[in-house]
Amino acid sequence: MTSEMTLVGHLTELRRRVLYAVIPAAVLLIPAFVYAPTLLAFLYRPALAYGYTLHLYALTDGLTLRLRASLLAALISTLPNTIAQAYIFIFPGLYSRESRALLWFTILTALLFSAGIVVFIVWLTPFVVYIWDRYDAAHVLLSAAVYYDVWEICALVCGTLCALPAGIWVLRKIGNALKS
């Protein structure tokens, strides 16, 4: 790649990086779809431990849940590659201090986001179900789709909150680089 590119060159490079990020996710979608029932059974285990029975109320709930779980698994599995492709695209336009800060940011963000999701799955999901159980003493029938919606939102929020310190750190580094 040359130091100066035309608009068409930038758009071509962007398309290539997007394809390099999307193709692995699409390929991983197939095995994730095959193993989605196992993943969903693992995610539903805390609710089942409290005596809930998860039901599918709509005709398409089973397929929709399987697709959503497999898509989330494929996207999270390819997150390091996606972040790397974004870094490779942005890298040539940065100064050396900015590129070092961005490199640390990409590594820390991927690790902290993944750690946040693992923390949520292992420790916080049972706690969320415990809180849910305290407010639902009647054990009303629970929709599997609603449970997955709550789980997905909470997992992504937890991952994002865990990755937030990396974002604050890199903004401080870039701010210090701009001052000097």
Image (spheres, rainbow, N blue to C red):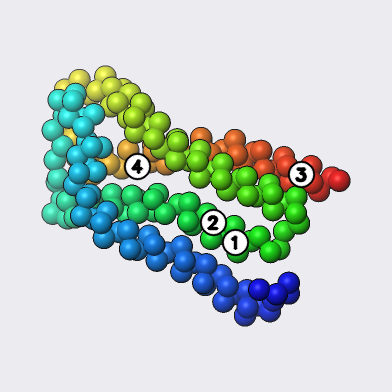
Q: CA distance from mark 1 to mark 4?
A: 29 Å
Quarter of the image where one finds residue 145: top left
On screen, residue 84 above or below 57: below
- Give the residue pinned by disc 4: 152
Mark found first going from the N terminus, 1 or 4:
1
- Give the residue pinned by disc 3: 175
Q: Which-is-in-front pick, marks 3 and 1?
A: 1
Q: Nearer the viewer, residue 64 or 5?
A: 5
Under mark 4, the amino acid is: Glu
Q: Residue visible at 72% across and 59% down? A: 94
Q: Nearer the viewer, residue 173 or 58?
A: 173
Q: CA distance from mark 2 to mark 4?
A: 24 Å
- Give the residue pinned by disc 2: 84
Q: CA distance from mark 2 to mark 3?
A: 23 Å
**Viewed as shown, does residue 84 lie left or right of 5?**
left
Q: Contact, CB < 8 Å: mark 1 with mark 2? A: yes
Point out residue 86 in the picture as x, y percentages from the top left corner. Answer: 56, 59
Task: Specify few, some or many for label 4: CA neighbours under 10 Å numbering under 14, 14-19, or 20 or more.
Answer: some
Under mark 3, the amino acid is: Gly
Q: Residue visible at 68% across and 64% down? A: 92
Task: Specify few, some or many for label 2: CA neighbours under 10 Å numbering under 14, 14-19, or 20 or more.
Answer: some
Under mark 2, the amino acid is: Ala
Point out residue 60 in the picture as x, y percentages from the top left corner. Answer: 17, 55
Q: Which-is-in-front pick, marks 4 and 3?
A: 3
- Label 3 sits on a secondary structure element that is helix
Mark found first going from the N terminus, 2 or 3:
2
- Give the residue pinned by disc 1: 88
